Image (tube, grey):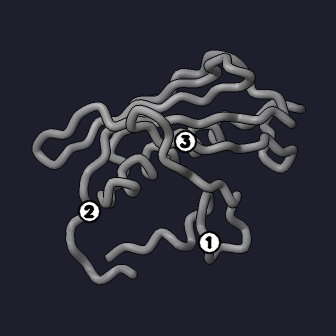
Amino acid sequence: MMSHARCMVCGTHNPDSLGIRFYQGEEGTTEGLFIANQRHQGYSDILHGGMTSTLLDAVMTHALLQRGIRGLTAELTVRFIAPIDIGSKVALSARIVDQRHGIYRLNAVASVGGMIVAKASAKFIKPKANNRS
């Protein structure tokens, strides 16, 4: 069984983790909150796009985990709508859209002050059985 405890986003056994906690939201969503920090900036005072992508991927991963499904990202598409200023509280939300033939499709959004600043869609696959722990 693959372990998630050392995850760089939410890992409880990773001292360098971002420490984000995800929870079940309303209407089947998974939610989380991240405060954009200068350590994660790209251009001055703007959150790095790679960090935004990571956050969206993580909230979608947790949408699966909260339902007892372990999935690996097979495809991730991110649409950046507006820059995220350092210091912003970034609300994350994801939902499972579809599941067919072992492929899970999910959507996620990142919002600041109620305004959507990034959207993502992804396909996840179940990992093959192995000895990882």
Disc 2, disc 1: CB below 8 Å? no
Residue 126 picture location, percent across and down = 24, 57
Q: Which residue is mark 3?
A: 31
Mark nearest the camera among 2 and 1 is 1
Q: Rounded to the nearest whole Å, what is the CA distance between mark 3 and mark 2?
A: 24 Å
* Label 1 or label 3, whichever comes before in sequence order: 1
Identify the amino acid type marked 2.
Pro
Foreground: disc 3 or disc 2 = 3
Vertical side of 66 occupied by 41: above or below: above
Q: Amino acid at mark 1?
A: Thr
Corner quadrant of residue 85? top right
Q: Which mark is residue 12?
A: 1
Disc 2 designates what residue? 127
Within 10 Å of disc 3 (Cα), the crowding (few <14, some 14-19, many 20+) is many
Which is nearer the N-term, disc 2 or disc 1? Answer: 1
Q: Is residue 128 above or below residue 60?
A: below
For the residues labelled 3 and 2, say whether their Cβ atoms are less than 8 Å apart.
Answer: no
Mark toward the start of the polypeptide (3 vs 2): 3
- Residue 83: image quadrant is top right
Secondary structure of the residue carrying tag 3 is strand
Instruction: Give the CA distance from mark 1 to mark 3.
Output: 18 Å
Q: Is residue 108 above or below residue 13?
A: above
Estimate how packed mark 1 is, as few (under 14), some (14 to 19) or many (20 or more) residues with alpha carbons within 10 Å: some
